[in-house]
Amino acid sequence: MMINLFSSFDPSTFIYSFNWFSSILIFFFLFYFYWLIPSRFNFMSLMLTKIIHSEFFILIKNPANMGMTLIFISIMFFVIMNNFFGLFPYIFTSTSHLILTLSLSLPLWLSFMIYGWLFKTNHMFSHLVPLGTPFPLMPFMVCIETISNVIRPGTLAVRLSANMIAGHLILTLLGNTGSSFSLYLMPILVIIQIALLTLETAVAFIQSYVISILLTLYSSEVN
């Protein structure tokens, strides 16, 4: 029995703490690429990679940094697989923890900031004051832009984990209250849970796309 509602997101809830192994399930799908004859999975993944690469390349706007899209595509697929696997029973949703989401957003944001301030200092200073800002408002805009840059990795991490936790909490609440429902209301409860599960599937894909797009935008500001 759970101590509280949030204990379902605790990686040490069960006797054997193998919950974090759910984050490496994506590696079981990578071995399809080592076959001599390409499969449908290969063609589908390559087609998706090309489409996402064209989307990210538009945001980067620099042909010299074309290879950077592979980093964001890898992060997107990693987050998609973890979000999607978390919808299955008895599989831990690793992206609902700030430990994983911060480990994705913080190193990339730090690398962008260090590279920008070391090699493109004037460009980074110009981003602190938006174009057309009145002179009396410039000190305030510098403070606001600095704060917005500092909290970026936190907002990325909290956005992903909060969206994953919110949907799972609603599904858990509905599942726990099903025993108190009458027999006539059970079909309505099942329909609501199926609709919420469909919504959570869409959220799992959307949030992975959002975090990769935001990381691409942050890198394009530096480059």
Image (cartoon, helix red, strand yellow):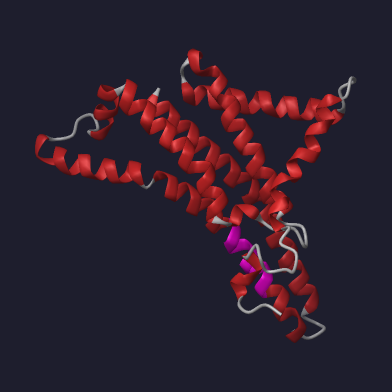
Q: Residue furthest right?
A: 37
Counting from the top left corner in percent of width and height, residue 166 is at 58, 63
For this rendering, which residue is in front, 108 or 147? Answer: 108
Counting from the top left corner in percent of width and height, residue 221 is at 38, 28
Asked if 188 appears above or below 205 in the picture, the reply is below
Q: Quadrant of the C terminus?
A: top left
For this rendering, which residue is in front, 3 or 189? Answer: 3
Residue 78 appears left or right of 190: left
The residue drawn where x is 75% and y is 62% is: 194
Q: Quadrant of residue 164?
A: bottom right
Q: Residue furthest top?
A: 64
User: Magenta part mainly helix, strand or loop?
Assistant: helix
Q: Quadrant of the N terminus?
A: bottom right
Residue 190 appears left or right of 220: right
Asked if 113 appears above or below 165 in the picture, the reply is above
The residue drawn where x is 48% and y is 26% is: 59
Counting from the top left corner in percent of width and height, residue 27 is at 76, 39
The residue drawn where x is 75% and y is 29% is: 45
For this rendering, which residue is in front, 101 or 167? Answer: 101
The residue drawn where x is 75% and y is 45% is: 25
Q: Assess whether residue 91 is covered by the magenta stretch.
A: no
Q: Which residues are magenta?
A: 164-173
Q: Assess whether residue 170 is covered by the magenta stretch.
A: yes
Q: Residue furthest left?
A: 136
Q: How many numbered marks have been drawn onto this rendered protein structure?
A: 0
For this rendering, which residue is in front, 212 or 197? Answer: 212
Counting from the top left corner in percent of width and height, residue 10 is at 62, 65
